[in-house]
Image (cartoon, rainbow, N blue to C red):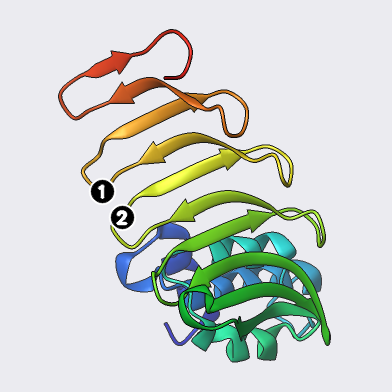
Amino acid sequence: LATPRLGLLAHRRGLARFVDLRFAIAMNLLIQRCAAAGTFGTVSVTLSEVTLRKYAGDCRASADHFPWLASVSPALCLSSEVTGAGASRAEYWRLRRGEENGANLRRRLLQSGKVQHYEGEQGAERNVRTEFADGEVQYYEGERGAERMVRVEFADGTVQYYEGERGAERMVRLVLPSNVVHYEGERG
């Protein structure tokens, strides 16, 4: 893969050995540069916010990659900060525009391993997904402060679906590996 054309071919075909997140971002940058230059020329390109948000949402993402991301896209990259103590000690990932921190993308509680993922502009971030160390994943919808749980996926493949406002969610469907159960009526 010493040539950009072979790298692009591997990226487009999704070859297992070339699905690394940094490789994918590098190939996306190359595609952008080629499109901007009309050929394999040298043009400065900034990573898109969409690409960085996808990266931060991937379970393979690592803050160890942030210096590399900043080197290829200094105008828009990711930053990491650890705050708090004990059970509330957390690592925050944020968008960074130049030297200024932007929207929160994720929060990982270091002691429990719980990871919360956010969407939205700075100051209006809302929780859209929470991952637990045991493999449970909770999904949320709604505006900031009114997020309601809509689905829970478990490591064994079981999925629970919920309806209702925040704090009054009720399970309406349970999908098990062997069957599906529907629930009616109010919570409780």
| Position in image of residue 179 (x %, y %) | 20, 19
Residue 14: quadrant of the picture? bottom left
Among all residues in the image, which is located at the extreme left?
A: 178
Q: Is residue 64 visible in the rendered structure shown here?
A: yes
Position above or below: 171 against 58: above
| Position in image of residue 164 (x %, y %) | 58, 23
- Please give the residue where the numbered disc 1 appears in the rendered image: 155
Indicate the amino acid at tag 1. Ala
Q: Which of 25 and 121 is in front in this view?
A: 121
- Please give the residue where the numbered disc 2 appears in the rendered image: 135
Position above or below: 166 against 114: above
x 40%, y 39%: residue: 152
Position above or below: 112 against 83: above
Indicate the amino acid at tag 2. Gly
Contact flag, marks 2 and 1 (Cβ < 8 Å): yes
Q: In this view, does 61 lie to the left or right of 84?
A: left
Q: In this view, does 43 lie to the left or right of 24?
A: right
- The crowd level at tag 2 (other Cα within 10 Å; few <14, some 14-19, many 20+) is few
